[in-house]
Amino acid sequence: MNRIVITGNEAVSRGFWEAGGAIASSYPGSPTVSILDSMKSYPEIFAQWGSNEKVAMEIAIGGSMAGARSLVSMKHVGINIASDPFMTFTQTKTKGGFLLVVGDDPGLSSSQNEQDSRFWGKYANIPVLDPSTPQEVKDFVKVGLKISEDFNTPVLIRLTSRLCHSRGIVEQEDRIPAPISGFQEEQGRYSMLPPYAVAAQEFMYNRMIKLREYNNESSLNRLEKVGSDVLIITSSLCYENLKEINPRADILKLGMIWPMPLEYIRSLSENYSKIIVLEETLGFMEEELKIKGIPAEGKKYFSYTGELTIEEVKKGLAKAGIIDNSDMPNEEYTKVPRTPMLCTGCPHRPVFDILKKLKATVIGDIGCYSLGILEPFEVHKTNISMGASLGMALGVAKAQSLSGNKKPVVATIGDGTFFHSGMTGFMQLADCDENITVIVMDNRTTAMTGGQITPTTSKYFKEYENHGVNISDVLSSFGIEDITIVDQFKYKETKTAIDAAMKRDGLSVIITTQPCALNFKIKKPHYYVDENTCIGCRSCIKTNCPAISMKFYPGKTKKNSYIDPDMCVGCSVCAQVCPVGAIKLSSTGGLELNPSGGIQINPSSGIQFGPSKEV
């Protein structure tokens, strides 16, 4: 049997392929992005990005209804978008095996909240599997599909950021094809209207009773005894961290954490004087045990937020008296914070610099441009959810107007978010009479999660040239007339356009068109600083470009600006904001935006695209 070292995300794809999986869909969101990316390496699987999580969910639901083993993956907050179809689908009698794979984010490494997806299992009346290693991830995918078909239920597999991205040894097995029966018309099975939905509720209730009985005997749960009167109940990566400490306590490692094996745990509890529950974020298992009269403690020892690292678990166990304080390390760890910043040549940078200088009130959204919240720009004042900037801008503008405050409001949204959930917000704004300016930052990709395509990516990929969507045309079809298309690397023109839009009544839209410099590997002749002209005013530094710093030049007594030629991609923003013309181009040629918004390339310019980017 072959063994490979792969991530938890890749293990999902491997397990799905081995189990005869056929339909996979997703919307890109960290930490689960590479599940679908790696799924595409298996030709037997139809793997496609949805325009948002709801659409991705519906693709997988349709596949399951047609008898195909189907999977949808997303990050934890994505379930909020997909919950409308999901919460009704969960009461149907599932046909083809159906998995919802969710990536939770304890510690908020790439998210706006720590939403605990385990609660969806209880809310939606479906089982939840909670693996702890990439090998278990692969195994649980296969087990989950079998449970799904045996009990006619969707199954949720809950991962965390650490498990998604960590690597482990995984055994490879052959694919076992699963037959696809095809869609059969059964209105009573899939049409959730009265009276069918009433019967479906009864089926769902009885299904959970059977699943609870199953889990009381399931081999997914494992008791490890050392002869202690203390029992620690845990799951997921918490188990792996606990094993690193190897405390003198019996351990019940749960694989299916909902419905909990309560009768099994109740019978075990009689043998222990103390039961500790070790789980990340909220006290899901602890609360359930207490509700059922099983004495358990957990969150009094362990944090309700953040990752439970080995160090954090040690502290909690010491507090609970399970390990001795002398076992705790004395060394103190110093974490050096690194502020996230936009990439060199990022087309969002000049927009933020302009908005800061205009002192605009900016309602932000989700994407790379979320970094506009941080120093040195600090222009975005909100960050709630995808597409929220538009409706929130309307609410802010209306509230201010009612109070007599006519200050203009600016909202930002990217092309990925525009197609995800922004169009409905724009339809709401279409007949707005308040002073609202929306900047659509169309960089032709879902950049924050690794450069997945959007409907505007077609300008750069020939294979998608028949699926191009023009944002300006879409907005015009909504009846929006005040639309300005700008090349934000033409700094002064862009500033003039945004300033003018903010002064006009009603809704105005600015569409910026420069692409993601990282995803499209854009490289022009670099700029350099004439140290004899530079006055050290730091105007270029304030654009927050990683290529620009301050240094002492030979013979100088104070620092002047410096541009690293290896990092500079030649976007020219620094040269345009320099008040004395000290920043100069090393040679001529490069990238220009033509009037239609497409990229015009001079063959001698030195612009480079990645090998898979065919222009």
Image (spheres, helix red, strand yellow):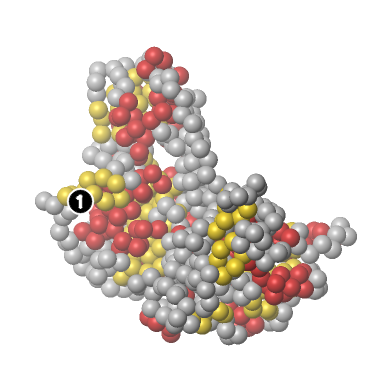
Residue at the (69%, 56%) spot, across then down: 535
Q: Is residue 297 left or right of residue 576?
A: left
Q: Position of residue 474 (x, y in %)?
A: 59, 80
Front residue of this view, candidates 16 and 274? 16
Number of numbered tags placed on the structure image: 1
> Is residue 291 positioned above or below 349 on the image?
above
Report if residue 270 is visible in the image. Answer: no
Q: Which residue is mark 1?
A: 4
Q: Is residue 531 left or right of residue 361?
A: left
Residue at the (41%, 28%) spot, across then down: 311
Report if residue 606 is visible in the image. Answer: yes
Q: Is residue 525 left or right of residue 179?
A: right
Residue at the (65%, 46%) spot, across then down: 557
Residue at the (38%, 78%) spot, across then down: 614
Front residue of this view, candidates 83 and 6? 6
Q: Amino acid at mark 1?
A: Ile
Q: Position of residue 245 (x, y in %)?
A: 32, 26
Residue extending farthest to the front is 555
Mark 1 packing: few (<14 Cα in 10 Å), some, or many (20+)? Answer: few
Residue extending farthest to the right is 404
Picture quarter containing residue 406?
bottom right
Front residue of this view, candidates 64 and 25? 25
Q: Position of residue 501 (x, y in %)?
A: 75, 73
